[in-house]
Image: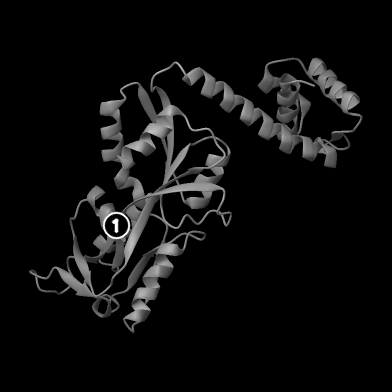
C-alpha cells in the first residue's frame, strides 16, 4: 500500500461513491475500484460496506481514514518544509480572524508586505470554532483572535502568542442626551440604555466578562439584542436602538457618524488578543515570520 492508494481511499471515503471520487481524481471508475479491492486484499479486511447507494466505512475503514489523513498531512508538510529550505519568503499566507479583530490585520499586513514582497494573503473571517475547524483542515495557518481561545478545551492543541491588550469603550447613539464635553461613562449610566451584546452561540467569553463588570457595579443591563456581527452591532447603535461595549481597536475600522465613544470609569477590564496556531503543525516560513514580526 502506498501514498497514491491512500489518496484514492480517502477520496472515496469522503465522497461515498466511486463514480464521484473517480471524477475528482480524474481517472476511470474500474481502475479505482480495483485499487480499493487490492488494498482490502493486502490488508485482509473490508474497508467499505457496499450495501445501499452510498459506500459506508467499516470500523477498519474508519481507523484507516483517520491514520491516512494524518500520514498524508505529515507527508505534505514534510514536502513543503523541504522545498522551503532554499526558497525565500513567498507564497500564500492564510490567516483566520475573528470579527472583532479585523481592524488589527490591515496595519500588520501592510508592515509585513514591506518586508516580504513575495507573499500574498488569504483572509478568512469567523468565530473561534469555525476558524479552528479550518485550521484543522489546513485551510488556514494562523488565527488572530480574542483570548481565551474558546474553540478547544485541549490546552496542548494550540500555541498562543498574546498581543497587547485592548481597552473596552462604551458606544452610544449620538442622539442620547449627555454633555457634549463628556468623554467617560460609568457602568451604572451605561446600564440605563438598552444593550446590544456582541456574542455568538458558541463564543461567549467577551459577553460573560462584560456581564461580570455590570454585576460588580451593582447593575443588570437590559439585553435588547445579541449580535454576532460587529458591523451590525454598530449600525444598530447608530440607529439609536441601544448601546454597546466593544474593544477600542474595533472602532478604528468604522465611521463615527451618529455614534459616540466613551471611556468606561472604574471598570478595570481589557480585551486580550493573540495569535493562535497548532502546536503539531509545520508552519510555513511566511507564517513564522508573521509571528516573529509581532515579537520583535
Q: Residue at x 84, y 34 (%)?
A: 48
Residue 183 in the image: above or below residue 33: below
* Above or below for 161 versus 7: below
Q: Quadrant of residue 182?
A: bottom left
**x and y percentages locating residue 67 in the rendered image:** 73, 35
The tally of labels here is: 1
Q: Nearer the viewer, residue 186 or 114?
A: 114
Depth check, front residue: 196 or 124: 124
Query: Which residue bears the numbered disc 1?
Result: 166
Task: Establish if 198 lies above or below 72.
Answer: below
Where is residue 58 drawn, in percent x and y? 84, 40
Residue 221 visible in this rendered orientation of the protein: no
Q: Is residue 295 left or right of residue 62?
A: left
Residue at (31%, 56%) from the top-left corner? 165
Q: Is residue 155 left or right of residue 95?
A: right
Q: Is residue 94 left or right of residue 256?
A: right
Vertical relation: 38 (above or below) 205? above
Residue pushed farthest bottom? 218
In the structure shown, which secondary structural element does the residue marked by tag 1 occupy?
strand
Residue 115 in the image: x percent, y percent?
28, 27
Mark 1 crowd level (few <14, some 14–19, many ≥20, 10 Å Cα): some
Viewer-closest of 145 and 11: 145
Q: Quadrant of residue 54?
A: top right
Q: Position of residue 10 (x, y in %)?
A: 72, 30
Q: Quadrant of residue 125?
A: top left
Residue 41 showing in the rendered view: yes
Q: Quadrant of the N terminus?
A: top right
Image quarter where the C terminus lies is: top left
Amino acid at each position: 500500500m502506498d501514498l497514491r492508494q491512500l489518496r484514492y481511499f480517502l477520496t472515496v471515503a469522503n465522497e461515498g461513491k466511486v463514480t464521484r471520487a473517480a471524477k475528482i481524481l480524474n481517472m476511470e471508475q474500474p481502475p479505482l475500484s480495483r485499487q480499493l479491492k487490492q488494498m482490502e486484499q493486502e490488508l485482509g479486511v473490508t474497508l467499505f460496506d457496499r450495501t445501499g447507494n452510498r459506500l459506508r466505512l467499516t470500523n477498519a475503514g474508519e481507523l484507516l481514514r483517520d491514520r491516512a489523513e494524518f500520514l498524508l498531512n505529515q507527508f505534505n508538510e514534510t514536502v513543503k518544509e523541504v522545498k522551503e529550505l532554499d526558497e525565500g519568503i513567498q507564497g500564500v499566507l492564510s490567516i483566520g480572524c475573528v470579527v472583532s479583530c479585523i481592524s488589527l490585520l490591515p496595519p500588520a499586513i501592510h508592515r509585513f508586505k514591506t518586508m516580504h514582497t513575495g507573499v500574498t494573503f488569504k483572509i478568512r473571517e469567523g468565530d473561534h470554532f469555525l476558524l479552528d475547524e479550518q485550521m484543522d483542515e489546513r485551510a488556514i495557518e494562523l488565527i488572530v483572535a480574542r483570548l481565551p481561545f474558546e474553540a478547544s478545551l485541549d490546552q496542548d492543541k494550540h500555541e498562543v502568542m498574546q498581543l497587547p491588550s485592548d481597552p473596552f469603550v462604551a458606544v452610544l447613539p449620538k442622539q442620547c442626551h449627555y454633555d457634549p464635553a463628556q468623554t467617560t461613562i460609568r457602568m451604572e449610566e451605561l446600564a440605563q440604555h438598552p444593550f446590544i451584546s456582541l456574542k455568538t452561540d458558541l463564543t461567549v467569553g467577551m459577553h460573560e466578562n462584560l456581564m461580570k463588570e455590570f454585576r460588580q457595579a451593582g447593575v443588570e443591563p437590559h439585553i435588547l439584542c445579541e449580535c454576532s456581527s460587529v458591523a451590525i452591532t454598530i449600525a444598530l447603535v447608530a440607529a439609536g436602538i441601544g448601546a454597546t461595549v466593544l474593544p477600542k481597536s474595533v472602532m478604528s475600522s468604522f465611521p463615527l457618524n451618529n455614534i459616540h465613544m466613551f471611556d468606561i470609569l472604574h471598570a478595570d477590564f481589557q480585551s486580550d488578543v493573540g495569535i493562535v496556531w497548532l502546536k503539531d503543525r509545520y508552519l510555513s516560513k511566511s507564517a513564522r515570520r508573521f509571528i516573529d514580526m509581532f515579537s520583535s
